[in-house]
Amino acid sequence: MKLNPELMDAENPEWTDEDFKNVIPFSELPKSLQSLLSGKVEARETSVTMNLSVDVLQAFQAMGTNWQMQLNNALREWLAEHSV
């Protein structure tokens, strides 16, 4: 494979085989570092059972694997726009 010099970046070079061997999976990092890297200071989630219209559920599920997070974000945005 020939490298494109236009895509080379001295500050962020292409990973070597050695770099890949030294990778630590995110799940194996200390929880405090995971929180810092994910932008979450403290995970505050709870599981709920609720009824949604089929079309609403399908629309969010069509967004892919993060559909539940997208639904949560949409609800959070709605709450920010409406006094509770």
Image (cartoon, rainbow, N blue to C red):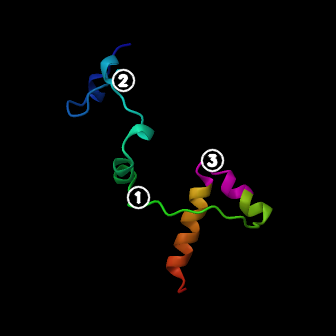
Q: Which residues are magenta?
A: 58-67
Location of residue 53 with respect to 18 vertically, above or below: below
Residue 18 falls left or right of residue 73: left
Quadrant of the rendering where the C terminus is positioned: bottom right
Q: Which residue position holds label 3? A: 64
Residue 51 rendering spot, x and y as whole percentages: 76, 67
Q: Give yes or no for residue 33 being in the magenta stretch.
A: no
Quarter location, residue 40: bottom left
Q: Are marks 2 and 3 in contact (CB under 8 Å)?
A: no
Using the rendered view, name the quadrant where residue 4 is placed.
top left
Residue linked to disc 1? 40
Residue 60 in magenta? yes
Nearer the observer, 62 or 23: 23
**Residue that label 2 marks:** 20
The quadrant of the image that shows the N terminus is top left
The CA distance from mark 2 to mark 3 is: 28 Å
**Is the residue 41 above or below the residue 33 in the image?**
below
Q: Could you tell me which secondary element the residue under label 3 belongs to?
A: loop
Q: Residue at x 36, y 29 (%)?
A: 23
Of callouts 2 and 3, the N-terminal one:
2
- Amino acid carrying label 3: it is Gly
Q: Identity of the amino acid at label 1?
A: Lys
Q: Are marks 2 and 1 in contact (CB under 8 Å)?
A: no
Q: 41 left or right of 12? A: right
Give coordinates of residue 19: x percent, y percent.
Answer: 31, 23
